[in-house]
Image: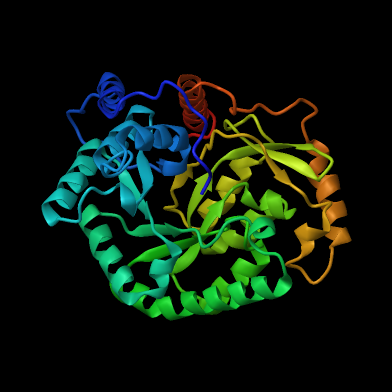
Amino acid sequence: MNKPYPDCNIPTRREFLFSISVLALSQYVKPAQPIALKAFGIAQASFRIRSTQAAQAAGSEGPSIPAEKYIDLCKSFGGDGCQFDFNLLSSTDEDYLRRIHRSLEDKGMFLELSMPAQWLADQNSLTNAAAVAKELGATKIRVAINGRRYEEFSELKQWKDFFSHWSEVMRQAEPLLKKLGLVVGIENHRDWMADELAEVLRQISSSYLGACVDFGNNLALLEDPLEVAQKLGPYAVTSHLKDMTLTASEEGFLLADVPLGQGILPIAKIMEIMRKGRSDIHFCLEMITRDPQTVPFKDDKYWATYEKRDEARIEKFKSTVLSKSSAASLSKISGMSSARMLAVEDENIRKCVSYAKRTLGL
């Protein structure tokens, strides 16, 4: 996980939660008639700064933003649904879960959950997760198994052990997922290359275990986003909708999250591919407001988890993707005040929602 952002003038927990309530109430009015469920959701990572500041304000007093507040927050920003971690739930009591379910239904919103990868390897955890998801009306769960491949692993054997272990965990979990009626999507989380994840999912061949297709993550593995979508599309369960841009650097390139429509990703084409694989797929916005991240592909350490340095992949990436890089410097949030960081995050999300509704037709 990223370290907390530098901050100052952090609001009290009461002030922070009150600001969320005011925002939600000022922009959301309960409709007289139920709203038809749509496909545009907002993933929890989009509110990373807000969540970090809320956690700092609340201390150890439960979830950073409780599920019921998070649902209101997504609705206030224009989301038709949301994707959040189990740890936003204040309780697993049936009455509490049913209240949240009713709230989602009243607002015409869908829900997807995110769970720790370790739960896939534990039958009790998986069974409990399915029970909670059922009470909430969520049938899809997103799982990110690891972080960035080029940072987490220092040698090929580590990666091969990781690959073997989690491939087997997925295979063993599938029968239980089927029994529980729970659909899980494994995210391409800057760890699996598209071919690697697609091959594991092809071998398992299950409608209960697929992919959470992140539109831009595999740029960090020097893969073309459209090709990633084509390879993982047939297995898509859900997705992380985003846009990204990059600029060349001495180490390789800097990769930055940007509002939809301001980057280099062929968003509409990727969406079309995803829908061919699964007509009811949700597009969950993941607009992470943060500093650009270094992808050091020129460094030999970057290639430690591969058999060799792939010059062909490097040249292809340079000609098809890196050639579209921005000449302008990428914006940063480090050094901003807490209030300014939050304002930038909110504005980025609003721009994304506007683009999603007006241009992408979500």
Residue at figure coordinates x 79%, y 52% from the top left: 297
Near-viewer residue (175 or 108): 175
Residue 75 image-quadrant placement: top left
The colour mode here is rainbow
Q: Where is residue 150 in the image (x, y as percent from the top left)?
A: 69, 58
* Quarter of the view holding residue 22: top left
> Does the image show residue 281?
yes
Q: Is residue 362 visible?
A: no
Q: In the rendered view, would you say 40 is above or below 355?
A: below
Number of marks in the rendered image: 0
284 horizontally vs 81: left or right: right
The correct choice, above or below, for 128 with respect to 342 in the image is below
* 130 over 175 or under it: above or below: above
Front residue (pair 221, 184)? 221
Q: Residue at coordinates 36% horizontally, 72% vertically from top-left?
A: 177
Instruction: Give coordinates of residue 18: x percent, y percent.
Output: 25, 24
- Which residue occupies 34% across, 77% down? 176
Looking at the image, is 317 positioned above or below residue 133? above
- Left or right relative to 157: residue 44: left
114 on left or right of 236: left
- Image coordinates of residue 217 in percent, x first then y, are 62, 50
The quarter in which the C terminus is drawn is: top left
Horizontal and vertical percent position of residue 116: 41, 61
